[in-house]
Structure formats: structure tokens, C-alpha cells
Image: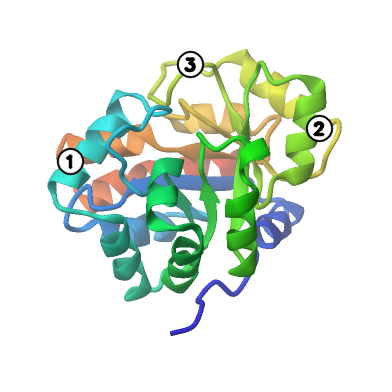
Amino acid sequence: MTDKTATSLEAELRAKREGGRKLLLPYVTAGIIPEWLELVEAVIDAGADAVEIGIPFSDPAMDGPTIQEASVQALNNGITPAAALSALEARPMGAPLLAMTYYNLVYRYGHDRLAADLARSGINATILPDLPIEEADDWNRAADEHGIENVLLVAPVTSDDRLAMLAEKTKGFLYSVSTMGTTGERTSLDDAASILSSRVKAISDVPVLIGFGISTPEHAVAACQSADGVITASALMRRVLEGASVDQTASLVADMRAALDAAF
């Protein structure tokens, strides 16, 4: 078996950005429903530029109640990291993929083994929100060997010096957390999101995507006034948890894509 990760996520996102496109990255919890692979395909067809695949973990500290519930449901359905990656390997997708999970899982799986399996499955990048950059050397070495980019996160309270360092060291894009706290649906977008994106733009040309609370097309448009794109997660998984079909869930992505294309 050979690595399926053929292109750089960052290169692809930069090319789309330079073409005038605002970037849209939906999130899907692996194993949340038996048809989760169909849901990944559906959000790609609806206009996703990449898809964040949540690899369920029993203690998702950065996630709010919706993603926690989605993770519990997926684990109860019997999903494992190896099973999720094997399923993706057997079913190539038409857009870049990112794996979002927690470092305990990475450590238990093994750095080199996981990086190799991610690459074989078509995963282009990772998001490990509980792995500080100061402690990420071992993972970064393994990831680099297999062409896996590691996306770093910044928050509204990130200092200027640390912001510059994270913007320099991130690969793929810089994940701009819209507000302090956990993931989850929100009724409005915090002004801190646009302020943080503007701070990054003043020092770096790395793609900046805003996540945490992007729940509606209006949120996506507002966030992209300052950012290069958005990540939407809880709003999508809430639809799935409430019994929406694959097509009904993906329609939110289609609505966001249409709103972004109309606004920019």
C-alpha cells in the first residue's frame, strides 16, 4: 500500500484563496451514523473545500455538548481510529481531509504508525487541539515523513509574540478560534473572531479559517469579512443527531457555500 496523500492541503487552500474563493470546511464525526462516509461525500458535493473528520475520543475536552454527544454515539456504534481510517482508505474522497482528534489517542496509536495510516487513508492534515507546539516535535517529525500537515490553533487571548510564532509554524492553515470556550452552536458571532483574524493578516499570509460557533450562512459571511474561510461543525452534527438525512444535513453546507459565493 502507498500513501494516498498526494498534494499539500495548504497549497490547495492558498490556490483557491488566490482565485477569490472563500474556504468552507465542514466537520463530520467518523462513525456517527452508518452512512458517515456518504455524508462526507455529500458535503463535498455541496461545496466543501476540505472536510474535517473527527476521530472520536472518550474525553474531548475542547468540544461542547454537541460534538461530545456525536463522539459518544460514534463510539457506541463501534467506531475505532483504525476502522475509520480503513473505511476512508477503501473509499477515496474528492477533497482534502483533515483528522481532528486528541493527543492521547495519537500517543496510544503510535506516532509513526498513525502518520502512515493517515496518509494511506487520504488524510492530508491533523488538528490536535490539546498538543502544544512546544511538545509537538515527535508528532511533527512523524507527520512530516508522511506528508501530513499539522494545523495549529490561536485564540483571542493569544499574545502577539505567540501569534507570530504559531502563524509561522502552522501547516495547512491557522485555525482561529472565534471565542474562548468549547465548540458549539451560537446565535451570534463574537467580534473577537474578526479582530483575531485581522491580527493574523497583519503579520502573515497563511490561510486563516474561523471555527467554533459557525452555525448559519450569515455567520459564515460575517466571519469571512476578515478571514479566508470558516469551519462548521456543531450545527452539522446537531442535524445528524436529530435524525436529519444525509442530504438534509449537507444542505446547510450548500446554503453556506451559496451565501459565501454571493457575498464575495
Q: Quadrant of residue 87?
A: bottom left
- Say which residue appears at 64% left-offset and 16% top-offset: 192
Question: How far separated are the C-alphas under marks 2 and 3?
Answer: 28 Å
Q: Earlier in the sequence, mark 2 or mark 3?
A: 2
Give the x, y percent position of residue 182: 43, 22
Residue 188 — which label? 3
* Circle 2: residue type: Ala
Front position in the image: 43 or 50? 50
Give the x, y percent position of residue 159: 75, 19
- Say which residue appears at 26% left-offset and 63% top-offset: 83
Residue marked by disc 2: 164
Q: Earlier in the sequence, mark 3 or mark 1?
A: 1
- Element at label 2: helix
The 10 Å Cα crowd at callout 1, few under 14, some 14 to 19, many 20 or more, is some
Q: Quadrant of residue 205?
A: top right
Left or right of 168, for residue 94: left
Which quadrant does the C terminus fall into? top right
Which quadrant does the N terminus fall into? bottom left
- Element at label 1: helix
> Would you place residue 120 above or below residue 151 in this image?
below
- Element at label 3: loop
Question: How far separated are the C-alphas under marks 3 and 1?
Answer: 28 Å
The 10 Å Cα crowd at callout 3, few under 14, some 14 to 19, many 20 or more, is few
> Would you place residue 108 above or below residue 192 in this image?
below
Q: Is residue 244 visible?
A: no
> Would you place residue 187 above or below residue 149 in this image?
above
